[in-house]
């Protein structure tokens, strides 16, 4: 990848990225994929996920593995000691030249450093300051859990999604992907862009606060109206849907397929292909409501049919006719022609010992005129420190002194 790739619609926007782990970096990744310049501030030890999923033999302290590469592409890295007076001054200078600041420290950390929203927005009118915390920030509503640390699994548990995931009647189950981190990231990216739009119109700064708990609850919206409308307390549902049928996973000779036929004309097509066209007019199965009432029988009929066929056979018979698809694993996805046609895999350099070209997921946001996407690999730790310092007015002697004193590296 290179800087000659299309820059994206946010070209010209600068984001000061004070995030680590997954939730914050995923949000700034979205902005970077859309063309924003992302200046990532790290400690001398680097983002905690840098060593994760390294190639064998790579113990370069400034290197990184697949975890970091995947969510920190299109970024520059500058190493600053935020506890030092000199380091804080560098952050202030950077913030004064940035459009957006994003951080995901625990509540109160940036305030204690003197780098809070109030501190930085005073230096830069129109600054958008975004944060992700486990339970939000007191500025928009103080949670009784405000000071609790949180990770993905905690957000999934408390936000409700784990409570409806798992085998029907069984134990709650964590969703494999870290949606307790990535869903808040998407909400934050949306929020800061909305705030930036307003800031451009009014010149006023704004604080954007996203809680991990809140975000998972928001995507679990159904459990709230089920409780309010019907006094239900939904539990794990397996792969079925409480209001739609058939709608879920069904076994094949070589795995599973997902089938969704809540619409009656789709059900008629499926019934015909199953060799039982009369099911489309049978009063037990004719409408979606009928099938929901007779869920066990409906799903058994479909299951008995799919279990005799391979995924490919079912796709050949019904692909494009009803909503269905195979349950893919990574090996299936990277060879799927859809993924190639949609440019959903990006090839980047993996530097360091054993370095080679590797693949990461590209952006799913496709814009016709300013497409954006992955332009550059993730940065080495502190790879851009000197260049960024020079851009904000530090001379070579000053930069050397900052290195010597440990303020930067």
Image: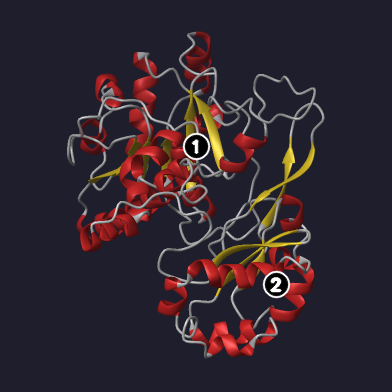
At mark 2, the secondary structure is helix
Q: Is residue 384 visible?
A: yes
| Picture mark count | 2
Of 298 and 245, the residue lying toward us: 298
Q: Residue at 51% across / 17% down in the picture?
A: 397
**Vertical arrangement, residue 250 with respect to residue 47, above or below:** below
Q: Quadrant of residue 272?
A: bottom right
Category of crowding for the residue at label 2, using alpha-carbon neighbours closer than 10 angstroms: few (below 14), some (14–19), many (at least 20): some
**Vertical arrangement, residue 308 with respect to residue 111, above or below:** below
At mark 1, the secondary structure is loop
Q: Which residue is mark 2?
A: 305
Where residue 103 appears, as percent x and y from the top left, is 37, 34
Residue 365 horizontal side relative to residue 275, left or right:
left
Q: Quadrant of residue 157?
A: top left
Q: Residue at 63% across / 81% down in the picture?
A: 270
Q: Is residue 369 visible?
A: no
Q: Residue at 57% across / 56% down in the picture?
A: 363
- Mark number for residue 212? none
Q: Which residue is mark 1?
A: 22
């Amino acid at each position: 990848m290179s800087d000659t790739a299309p820059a994206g619609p946010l070209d010209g926007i600068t984001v000061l990225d004070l995030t680590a782990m997954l939730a914050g970096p995923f949000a700034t990744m979205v902005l970077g994929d859309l063309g924003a310049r992302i200046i990532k501030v790290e400690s001398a030890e680097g983002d905690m996920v840098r060593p994760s999923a390294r190639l064998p033999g790579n113990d370069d302290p400034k290197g990184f593995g697949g975890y970091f590469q995947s969510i920190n592409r299109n970024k520059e890295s500058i190493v600053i000691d935020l506890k030092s007076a000199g380091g804080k001054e560098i952050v202030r200078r950077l913030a004064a030249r940035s459009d957006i600041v994003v951080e995901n420290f625990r509540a109160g950390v940036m305030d204690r450093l003197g780098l809070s929203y109030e501190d930085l927005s005073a230096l830069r009118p129109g600054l958008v300051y975004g944060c992700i915390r486990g339970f939000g920030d007191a500025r928009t509503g103080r949670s009784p859990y405000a000071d609790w640390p949180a990770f993905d699994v905690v957000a999934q548990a408390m936000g409700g999604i784990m409570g409806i995931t798992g085998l029907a009647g069984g134990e709650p189950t964590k969703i494999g992907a870290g949606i307790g981190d990535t869903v808040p990231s998407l909400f934050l990216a949306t929020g800061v862009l909305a705030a930036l739009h307003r800031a451009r119109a009014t010149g006023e700064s704004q604080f954007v606060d996203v809680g991990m708990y809140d975000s998972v609850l928001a995507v679990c919206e159904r459990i709230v109206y089920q409780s309010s409308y019907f006094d239900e307390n939904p539990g794990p549902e397996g792969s079925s849907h409480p209001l739609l049928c058939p709608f879920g996973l069904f076994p094949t000779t070589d795995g599973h397929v997902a089938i969704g036929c809540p619409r009656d004309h789709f059900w008629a097509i499926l019934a015909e292909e199953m060799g039982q066209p009369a099911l489309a007019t049978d009063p037990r199965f004719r409408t979606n409501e009928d099938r929901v009432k007779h869920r066990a029988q409906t799903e058994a009929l479909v299951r008995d049919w799919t279990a005799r066929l391979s995924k490919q056979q079912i796709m050949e018979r019904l692909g494009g006719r009803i909503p269905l698809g195979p349950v893919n694993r990574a090996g299936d996805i990277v060879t799927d022609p859809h993924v190639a046609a949609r440019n959903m895999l990006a090839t980047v350099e993996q530097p360091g010992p054993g370095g080679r070209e590797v693949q990461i997921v590209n952006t799913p946001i496709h814009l016709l005129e300013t497409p954006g996407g992955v332009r550059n690999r993730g940065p080495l730790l502190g790879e851009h420190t000197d260049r960024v310092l020079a851009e904000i007015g530090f001379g070579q002697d000053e930069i050397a002194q900052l290195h010597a004193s440990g303020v930067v590296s």
